[in-house]
Image (tube, rainbow, N blue to C red):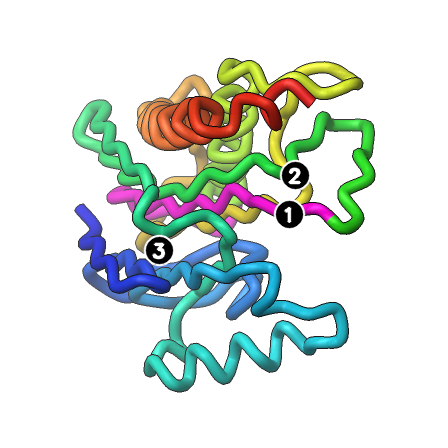
Amino acid sequence: MGAISLERPWIEFGLGEEMQVLSWAVNRPGLVTASRILWREVRNSDLPPDLDVTEWFAGELAQRGGDDAVAFLTSRDVRRYCEAEATVEGISAHAVATVGLSNAERIGSRMDYASRNWGTINIAVRLSQGLTHAGLIEAMSIAVQARTAAVMEAGITLPAGAATGTGTDCVAVAAPAGPNAYAGLHTATGEAIGRAVYQAVHIGALEWKSTNRRAAHA
């Protein structure tokens, strides 16, 4: 489906055509039209407290010619990205994720991560089926639900219980504009999105956990 290119510190996920993209990404958040989604790997030292991150990132994107892209920031080594595809009744979903859990959180509680490394989960999913705006919003809810299930089943233990995500997660869902207004769990669309996102995030979470055992049992 989508085409992935890796040129550290960047990942580019080419969508193959202009699509509607819904996200809360650092660059071009909200509901926009784009043909690609980018990740930019950063270290804590790249983002000092007094830095205007949005302005800095805009400059980085301009240097790369990526102003038009929906774009994430991640502290995860971009070479560790995970992807999964699923097709259900002819509807395909392609998910790409970078998964870092060093600032894992449980819903309804907050950890103190001052002066500690920050990770994040960034997910982009490309859907083959055309959706209305309402359908795209429901598709986002399925992608987020799949992220949460994948993290919970990876078993990252926090004082308040199992982690459900991190404090800096971001998701982007891309789909052609179309007439379908439904993407819930009872639909082929929702099943394809959920399966692809779950698999990509679960693989990434288990990989992170295997190399960060102490942090996984904070």
Q: CA distance from mark 1 to mark 2?
A: 7 Å
Frontmost residue, 23 versus 97: 97
Position of residue 193 measured from the top left corner of the image (x, y, whole percent): 37, 32
- Where 66 sits versus 125, above or below? below
Residue named by callout 2: 103
Residue named by callout 3: 177
Disc nearer the start of the sequence (1/3): 1
Secondary structure beneath disc 2? loop
Q: Quadrant of residue 194?
A: top left
Amino acid on which the number 3 mark rests in the picture: Ala
Secondary structure beneath disc 3? loop
User: Which residues are drawn in magenta?
Assistant: 116-134
Frontmost residue, 55 versus 113: 113
Residue named by callout 1: 117
Position of residue 13 measured from the top left corner of the image (x, y, whole percent): 28, 56
- Where 44 sits versus 168, above or below? below
Frontmost residue, 74 versus 142: 74
Disc nearer the start of the sequence (1/2): 2
Q: Name which residue lies at 44% across and 44% down.
A: 123
Frontmost residue, 172 versus 115: 115
Q: Name which residue lies at 58% across and 56% down.
A: 24
| 125 drawn magenta | yes
Of labels 3 and 2, the one closer to you: 2
Amino acid on which the number 1 mark rests in the picture: Asn
